């Protein structure tokens, strides 16, 4: 039976405009070489340019346009001439929140051929999935500022956790750990210092763990977790953390795996009420924009996650295999990996490995 998936493409700003079309090209190559698989892409020119023309990062009814899509492929939002909070909250977070994509999933592995900074660590020692709570916690936006400019000035950022919010992310993380070969989950916490929300976080982890007796789990303080990631990477598998903790740990993870340009992420609505969104973790990188220097591998790997989310496991595996064949060849490394290949060359090489005509 033939299936045509509707994919919304939002390149956004900077190198997003280069890597998202590259992602579309490899998905198209997959479809061309796999009977019964097809994609219908719709592109949306939202982001900094849209802001300059319309005073907002995306139209007010933008979410309605996306609602009927099967998934979203996102590039990056960020523009040196527009404040960060506008670009972030006006587009990416609007979609994450509007579609209740409460689970942010970040796989980390050292791909073949990549020179990663941990010299004692081979690909077999580093295979993690970090699950980030993506809807509340430290980034809930709760807090305030009083007496501005006065000696009594004060400000708070309140980390707000709800029982329902913590239960759903814990359940998602345990389920994901259960589906992986090692069936192992590490719950990141800071309940030694933060005595309210983090204590509830720990309690709920214990409670949800009882639903998954076959998953081995442990708790780790976030500060100790950074050292463990560097010194004993093989002892970690699936990791769940709050919005802020996972934000930091996943950048560390991306660096340990060799380059920001490789790492993928998915913003998932596990209940599938809305489309989920897949994107490379890097930003708009205006310093290298428009020069063909952007590494498209993070976007390609995000396409693998997109395919897995759609249930196209065979296609996902084929694409991952093609990506690994390409990273294994230093002649196909972009500049961030110490090579000289261009975005277009890497893209073409992946399409060729998929068996598509160049
Ligand atoms: P933003 O403000 O949107 O986060 P940024 O300019 O901070 O964007 P980042 O993506 O956070 O850029 O990356 C920091 C640097 O890493 C970039 O300036 C760029 O040089 C490099 N970099 C990031 N992504 C890639 C990539 N895909 N390919 C090559 N280099 C990259
Ligand atoms: Mg940045």
Image: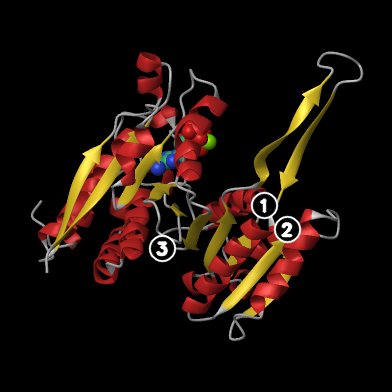
At horizontal 43% and vertical 28% (from top left) the residue drawn is 287
Left-right relation of 2 to 220: left
Q: Which residue is mark 1?
A: 245
**Up-down relation of residue 198 to residue 204 (above or below):** above
Which of disc 2 and disc 1 is earlier in sequence?
Answer: 2
Give the residue at the far right of this rendering.
Answer: 151
Query: Furthest residue to the bottom?
Result: 214
216 left or right of 270 in image: right
Residue closer to the observer: 81 or 149: 149
Q: Which mark is residue 230?
A: none
* Number of marks: 3
Tell me the element at label 1.
Answer: helix
Q: Which residue is mark 2?
A: 222
Indicate left or right for 338 with 166 as reference: left
At mark 2, the secondary structure is helix
Dividing the picture into quarters, in which one does residue 120 lie? bottom right
State the CA–CA distance, disc 1 to disc 3: 25 Å
- Residue 253: x and y in percent read 56, 56
Q: Are marks 1 and 2 in contact (CB under 8 Å)?
A: yes
The image position of residue 63, as x and y in percent, is 38, 38
Q: Residue at x 37, y 16 (%)?
A: 54
Counting other residues with Cα less than 10 Å from the Cα at mark 1, is it few (<14), some (14-19), or many (20 or more)? Answer: some
Residue that carries the numbered disc 3 in the rendered image: 111
């Amino acid at each position: 039976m033939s299936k045509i998936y509707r994919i919304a493409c939002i390149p956004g700003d900077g190198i997003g405009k280069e890597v998202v079309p590259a992602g579309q090209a490899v998905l198209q190559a997959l479809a061309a070489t796999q009977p019964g698989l097809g994609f219908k892409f719709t592109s949306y020119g939202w982001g900094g340019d849209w802001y300059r023309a319309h005073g907002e990062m995306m139209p007010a009814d933008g979410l309605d346009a996306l609602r009927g899509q099967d998934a979203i492929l996102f590039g990056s939002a960020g523009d040196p001439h527009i404040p960060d909070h506008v670009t972030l909250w006006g587009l990416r977070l609007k979609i994450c929140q509007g579609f209740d994509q409460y689970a942010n999933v970040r796989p980390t592995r050292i791909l073949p051929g990549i020179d990663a900074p941990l010299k004692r660590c081979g690909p077999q020692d580093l295979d993690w999935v970090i699950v980030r709570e993506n809807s509340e916690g430290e980034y809930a936006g709760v807090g305030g500022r009083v007496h501005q400019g006065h000696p009594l000035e004060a400000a708070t950022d309140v980390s707000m956790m709800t029982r329902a919010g913590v239960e759903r992310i814990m359940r998602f993380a345990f389920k994901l750990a259960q589906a992986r070969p090692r069936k192992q989950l590490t719950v990141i916490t800071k309940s030694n210092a933060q005595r309210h929300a983090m204590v509830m976080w720990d309690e709920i982890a214990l409670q949800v763990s009882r639903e998954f007796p076959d998953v081995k789990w442990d708790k780790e303080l976030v500060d100790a977790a950074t050292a463990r990631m560097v010194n004993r990477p093989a002892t970690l598998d699936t990791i769940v953390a709050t919005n802020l903790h996972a934000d930091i740990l996943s950048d560390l993870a991306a660096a340990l795996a060799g380059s920001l340009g490789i790492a993928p992420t998915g913003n998932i609505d596990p209940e599938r009420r809305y489309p989920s969104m897949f994107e490379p973790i890097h930003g708009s990188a205006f310093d290298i924009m428009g020069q063909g220097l952007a590494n498209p591998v993070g976007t390609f790997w995000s396409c693998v996650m997109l395919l897995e989310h759609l249930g196209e496991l065979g296609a996902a595996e084929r694409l991952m295999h093609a990506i690994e064949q390409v990273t294994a060849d230093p002649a196909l490394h972009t500049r961030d990996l110490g090579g000289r290949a261009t975005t277009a060359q890497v893209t073409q090489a992946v399409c060729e490995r998929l068996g598509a005509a160049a």
